[in-house]
């Protein structure tokens, strides 16, 4: 369970939050903190690579919009206000977290069962 929690919390699409989430999972489910945090740290580069695809997929699912960066560059050109940019970014982050949750729900149980079989075999 510690490996599974470390893996899925390690790819959470919001940088800087994964350590807090891992610590909460350790306290709540009485997991091994060394394993959870080690896997979280090992997956940090993968997390950074997955942030953009998760948020882009979330924008497509929720808003039928595949643009993430053009809106930010429009802000620097002066066509967006600060509040519009903040609203857009919050929507994008929420959409990315939703995609992460769907990934967790669709694959988490099977990943956990696969790890149990591997551990039992060794």
Image: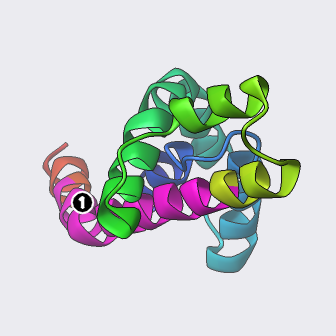
* Residue 9 seen from this side: yes
Residue 71: x and y in percent read 59, 38
Residue at 69% x, 39% y: name it.
Answer: 15
Residue at 61% x, 64% y: name it.
Answer: 31
Residue 67: x and y in percent read 43, 40
Q: Quadrant of residue 101?
A: bottom left
- Magenta portion: prevailing SS class: helix
Q: Work out which quarter of the rendered image holds the N terminus and state it.
A: bottom left
- The local secondary structure at tag 1 comes to helix
The residue at which mark 1 appears reads as 116
Residue at 73% x, 34% y: name it.
Answer: 75
Pick out the residue farthest to the bottom.
Answer: 28
Residue at 25% x, 50% y: name it.
Answer: 119
Q: Is residue 88 magenta?
A: no
The foreground one among 61 and 9 is 61
Specify start and end residues of the magenta stretch as a single range.
Answer: 90-114
């Amino acid at each position: 369970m510690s490996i599974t929690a470390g893996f899925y919390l390690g790819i959470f699409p919001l940088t800087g939050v994964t350590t807090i989430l891992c610590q909460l999972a350790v306290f709540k489910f009485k997991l091994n903190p060394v394993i959870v945090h080690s896997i979280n740290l090992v997956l940090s580069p993968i997390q950074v690579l997955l942030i953009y695809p998760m948020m882009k997929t979330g924008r497509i699912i929720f808003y039928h919009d595949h643009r993430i960066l053009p809106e930010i560059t429009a802000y620097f050109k002066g066509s967006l206000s600060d509040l519009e940019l903040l609203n857009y970014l919050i929507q994008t982050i929420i959409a990315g977290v939703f995609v992460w949750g769907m990934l967790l729900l669709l694959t988490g149980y099977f990943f956990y069962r696969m790890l149990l079989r591997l551990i039992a075999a060794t």
